[in-house]
Amino acid sequence: LQGPTWQPGEGLAIEVLVTNDGPDYFDYPGIRVTSSHPGVTDASAENWFFGMFAGQSEPLGVAFQASADAAPGTVVTFTVEVASLGLMGCEGVATLDVAATLEP
């Protein structure tokens, strides 16, 4: 998460470091992020690379926007999963949950 605080009506960027521990992969590897709160929406909750070489690591991010009427103190959980464009997810890859609290 970027920024010291997050308030209703503001945006939030989530960035993860994606590492390819396998062979070269050129079927659009990327991430898909979901929010646990209906008042926190995304312009695009997915982001993709064209490909990644074996052993390559690169940052990849997505942005979310909290509704102006979202209640301060609300904890929003973002679930990040590694995916490949056109696939629902990658088998055997763990998801990452990141919690953020809307500050007053």
Image (cartoon, rainbow, N blue to C red):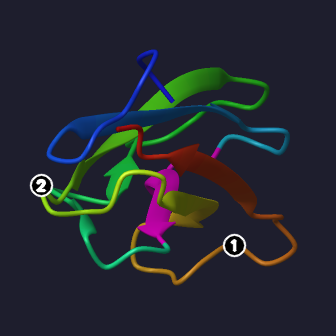
User: Under tag 1, what secondary structure?
Assistant: loop
**First of labels 2, 1 by sequence position:** 2
**Residue visible at 47% across and 62% down in the picture:** 32
**Amino acid at circle 1:** Cys
Left or right side of 18 for 62: left
Left or right side of 82 for 6: left
- Viewer-proximal residue among 20 and 25: 20
| Residue identified by numbered label 1 | 90
**Residue visible at 51% across and 30% down in the picture:** 1
Q: Which residues are magenta?
A: 25-35
Q: With respect to residue 85, does 3 lie above or below?
A: above
**Residue visible at 40% across and 74% down in the picture:** 37
Left or right side of 97 for 44: left
Q: Is residue 28 magenta?
A: yes
**Residue visible at 35% across and 49% down in the picture:** 47
Q: With respect to residue 15, does 95 lie above or below?
A: below
- Where is residue 15? Give x, y as percent: 49, 32
Q: With respect to residue 69, does 36 lie above or below?
A: below
